Amino acid sequence: MNITNLEKIKTLLETPEFLSIRNSEEFFFKKGQDKLQEWLNLEVSDEVKIKLFELSKNYRSLRELSKKEDELSPLVDLLFSIVAYADFQARDKSFYNEYNPPRTIAKAFVRMNIWVKHLLNFKFYPERLKAGNTSNAFKYLLSPTDQINVLSNTHRRLISKNVLQQRYSTATFTDAIIGYFKPFVSKVKDKRNITHLITRILYTYKSDWQLPERPTNSIEKDIADIVQGNLGSTEKETLILARIGQGKFRNDLINKWKGCTISGYPETSLLVASHIKPWSKCDHIEKLDPDNGLLLIPNYDKLFDRGLISFKENGSIIFSDLFSDSDFFDIDESITIDLNEGTRKYMEYHRKHVLKNS
């Protein structure tokens, strides 16, 4: 992004959405801030705390049981209210969000039960809550002049790299981005709205800094290489089917894993046959070896393929230190998959050569 394009941003700041932020005489999300502060100040018995943590595993159970228990109902309503200000995708947002139209700090796409679980941790066990969308949301609501509602740490790193042109630092990111946009955000009635104004500018021009998609022609190139190779027609067909996630390789993975390797999701028609050791690094035997494959839902396939997650020798999940949005994908350190001896060999390669580290 180039801030010397003054006219483009000046024009944006005069649109109704941006004028409403600039002209607000109080913190733009004050109602959400008040709800979060109310939750943090609330006294909760140990018995209710334990029950809330147990119910946070399933949003539907939490919602239904809270309607039947008078002690839980106001607490759950308060938690849902906070989420209604935090996430554009929140369930029952129009009911709990008191702004008209509803105001939300971000499109976080975090599942409701994860929001609730993290609100519980934020109050009772803050040391358990790692950096990510939810913790960034809570910190922003409590201190909007020192925090910013760019919730995704992946987005923060991309903005640091492609806008600020510097390495991402949790400690200095907000100050750096405020300094960068200072020429545009001086005319704001309430200074607590400066960071939200900057966030809206950033996401309006998201295409200027977001991560580009992986080139779409990589599969086509691999197939062309197979066709041009010195192989028999049957072997070529087998390799091509394996490359596009079909044929014997896919069927072998379905027989092996029965469903998504990580989540257990059983609808195999929606799952991706993913190589552990990248196709481009495999010999012909490795390309067809079922030990060199996982069966994954598309989101997990992307994370694994791009080296944002991997697995230890015992099968427990590893997160790249460049990836901090695990709450978005509903995965955490408790995930473990079963690895046989052959798969461990390929996974070792993935850890050493694919898993990304800063």
Image (spheres, rainbow, N blue to C red):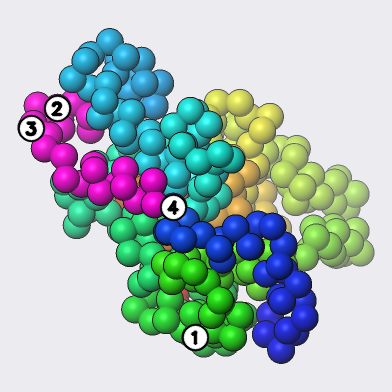
Q: Secondary structure of the magenta portion, mostly?
A: helix
Judge left or right: residue 180 versus residue 313.
Answer: right
Q: Check if mark 4's residue and mark 3's residue have beta carbons within 8 Å.
A: no
Q: Earlier in the sequence, mark 4 or mark 3?
A: 4
Q: Residue 29 — which label?
A: 4
Residue 321 belongs to the span the image colors magenta? no
Judge left or right: residue 251 versus residue 258.
Answer: right
Frontmost of labels 2 and 1 is: 1
Q: Earlier in the sequence, mark 2 or mark 1?
A: 2
Is any part of residue 135 visible from this angle?
no
The residue furthest top is 68
Identified at 31% across, 47% down, the residue is 34
Give percent across and percent down for residue 221: 84, 64
Q: Residue 46 — which label?
A: 3
Q: Check if mark 2's residue and mark 3's residue have beta carbons within 8 Å.
A: yes
Q: Residue 179 — which label?
A: 1
Residue 260 versus residue 169: which sits nearer the camera?
169
- SS for callout 4: loop
Q: Earlier in the sequence, mark 2 or mark 4?
A: 4
Frontmost of labels 4 and 3 is: 4
Question: Which amino acid type corresponds to the residue marked 1 in the rendered image?
Answer: Gly
Task: Residue under label 2, please give it.
Answer: 48
